[in-house]
Amino acid sequence: MRDVLVVTVDRPERRNALDLTTVRELRAVAGDTTVGAVVLTGAPPAFCAGADLTGVDSEEFGGELSAMLEAWDRWPAVRIAAIDGPALGAGTQLALVCDLRVASAGSEFGIPAARLGLAVDQWTVDRLVDEFGWPVARSILLTAERVDAETLHRMGAIHRLGSLDDAVGWAEEIVRLAPLSLDAHRAALLEARRRPARDLAVDAIRALAWASEDAVEGRTAFAERRPARFTGR
């Protein structure tokens, strides 16, 4: 059985805002193949309140943050975010890079970039749409609003409402599952994510339907108020 690892962002005096050192530490821990599940959390009173750019070049920080998220994204362990309190900016990004999310009822998510004159990268936009859905992604990015955990739980973006202990208990259940099955399912899920949004083969099939004799027959039968007689041509 593989191990469960708990990773805690521990900068409570800054509400666990990520500085350059913390980002590099998070990147360094990713990839341990002895770990079957990792629980990512933040020390009270927040999960992660964003990025701490004090005394740091923003371009350098952005590059390191992207590299860290990519490393976590490649980590074969099942990643669970245990969120209690605000998960803002980089905190939302940390939640998005996890496969599963457990959050306390009062937790909030948001990306206040538009309030700061900033713009997030395409990875964040894509992942926000994939994990939270188009309507929530639009709300977060175009209005800089926060979304609460209860709302996201109803939508399926938060998988369970609960505590850190609940997340760790779930991780302990997961590592008892068949590891090769989990590896296969992770690979299949990654392949599904890589597929283009528009499948040209599907478009071609759709075009054939619209240009078919059956399409003409269907419209004619509708106009004549009679059952259509389709032939597959």
Image: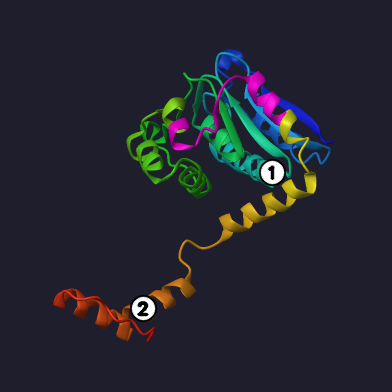
Viewer-proximal residue among 34 and 25: 34
Quadrant of the rendered image containing residue 162: top right
Secondary structure, mark 2, is helix
- On screen, 38 above or below 106? below
Q: Amino acid at mark 1?
A: Ala
Q: Position of residue 169 (x, y in %)?
A: 70, 24
Q: Residue drawn 42% across and 73% down?
A: 203
**Marks 2 and 1, how far apart in space?**
44 Å
Q: Which residue is mark 2?
A: 209
Q: Which residue is mark 1?
A: 71
In magenta, the rendered stretch is 153-171
Q: Position of residue 230 (x, y in %)?
A: 33, 81
Viewer-proximal residue among 25 and 42: 42
Residue 229 lies in magenta, yes or no?
A: no
Q: Residue drawn 55% across and 13% down?
A: 45
Q: Mark 2 or mark 1, which has the lower sequence index?
A: 1
- On screen, 120 above or below 168? below
Q: Position of residue 7 (x, y in %)?
A: 71, 26
Labels 2, 1: front one: 2
Viewer-proximal residue among 9 and 184: 184
Q: Position of residue 14 (x, y in %)?
A: 56, 17
Q: Is residue 181 left or right of residue 85?
A: right
Q: Amino acid at mark 2?
A: Ala
